[in-house]
Amino acid sequence: MMNAVRVKLSTMMFLEFFVWGAWFVTTSTYLSNTLKFDGTQVAAVYGAVAIAAVVSPFFVGMVADRFFATERILAILHLIGGALLWWMSTIHSFTSFYVVVILYALTYMPTLALTSSISFDNMEDSARDFPKIRVLGTIGWIVAGVAIGLLHLEATAVPLQLAAVASIALGLFDVVLPHTPPHAAGKQLSVRDVLGLDALSLMKDRSFAAFIIGSFLLCIPLQFYYTFANPFLIDSGMTAAAAKMTLGQFFEIFFMLLLPVLLVRMGVKKILMMGMAAWAVRYLAFAYGNVGSLVWLLYLGIVLHGLCYDFFFVTGQIYADQRASAKIRAAAQGFYTLITQGLGLLVGSWVSGHVVDMYSRTTPAGTVVHDWHAIWLVPATMAVVVLVLFLAFFRGQPAPAEAEAVTAQAV
């Protein structure tokens, strides 16, 4: 891969995940503590993101594959998204906030698949090159979290405004990304394309089907972390929680750089299983940790993010890319985003909101008290069940004969 292309793709990933990290981690604290939304309402806001992920990836993936260059679609979506984020920062009612966050998510969620697609399109070896590009996204998330945490902005609207500015900057930068024309330009449009059935055909493979179903199920407990980890840590008495949560991203960098070698030496199945197991351990650590003598468990739950995310979701993107042909690459990434960031997180937002409200009570003084121990045991149990099912049904594939050459290049 040419250095100029690598720099452009890396910058794209940095800004892509800076935007997401700036608002996604701490907005639940802002909604709960400042706007006084209840658990179900907070979860509904995060569920709106999942609704958008259900609706948009197939459509945009189909458009990127057929009608418009990927970099142009990214530019338009990020510019519109920046304006909507700023609008969100001025809203105080649940109904209005909910409507606008859905509109914003419709612009942002497709970009997760499209940034991966444009990266895969411009690299020679996805298993070797993608982690090196994607790691800049992790760094972007870290920079956003550290800034917000150290400045004590978690309970304010400033993170939304910071994300808005970054989104507009990314939209302007997108126009200089490598030109990535649609692969299926000129092909007659059909109902099969509109419904994304080309990507669905991958489900005929038993292992791919098990992978997709496992990804969906794992995203249900995942939403507990995305929505409620920051409020939990703040309730526990941890200071600068958003900044300390970026320790997970620091470890994400470490594990991401190991992926090219580990995928070859261990294979996809073992890597995915390790990622699933880490989710269960993380939630158990949160359930039993405190800011006193067991504060190390809270930090363990945070730093495990690197293993949780890289070993399952980044590996999953690579696996989906390897199973798809070039003509349906964007659709395959969109399909994976639909199942994980869409359907999985949508169900997870409903489940997590109800579980949090179930184990919460309001004191006579009007303070909401959460039984976080009971709350975190629920996603821990879910993650263990998913791991067992995945172990039973996913066969994986042996490492290719030419893997040794890839290993040598990665090292």
Image: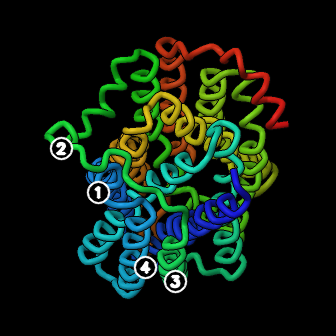
Q: Is residue 93 above or below residue 221?
A: below
As drawn, the label of residue 165 is: 3
For the C terminus, the quadrant is: top right
Badge 1 element:
loop
Label 3 Cα neighbours within 10 Å, binned few <14 / some 14-19 / many ≥20:
some
Label 4 Cα neighbours within 10 Å, binned few <14 / some 14-19 / many ≥20:
many
Residue drawn at x 52%, y 47% is: 121
Q: Earlier in the sequence, mark 2 or mark 1?
A: 1
Q: Nearer the viewer, mark 1 or mark 3?
A: 1
Residue drawn at x 39%, y 74% is: 81
Give the residue type at disc 4. Answer: Gly
Left or right placement of residue 17 versus residue 369 in this view? right
Pointer 2: what residue? 188
Q: Earlier in the sequence, mark 4 or mark 3?
A: 4
As drawn, the label of residue 67 is: 1
Q: Nearer the viewer, mark 2 or mark 4?
A: 2
Q: Earlier in the sequence, mark 2 or mark 3?
A: 3
**Do the numbered discs 4 and 3 sit on residues whose CB atoms are within 8 Å?**
yes
Residue drawn at x 34%, y 70% is: 104
Q: Nearer the viewer, mark 2 or mark 3?
A: 2
Query: Could you tell me how far apart the alpha carbons at marks 2 and 4 are, in whole angstroms?
Result: 34 Å
Pointer 4: what residue? 82
Q: Earlier in the sequence, mark 2 or mark 4?
A: 4
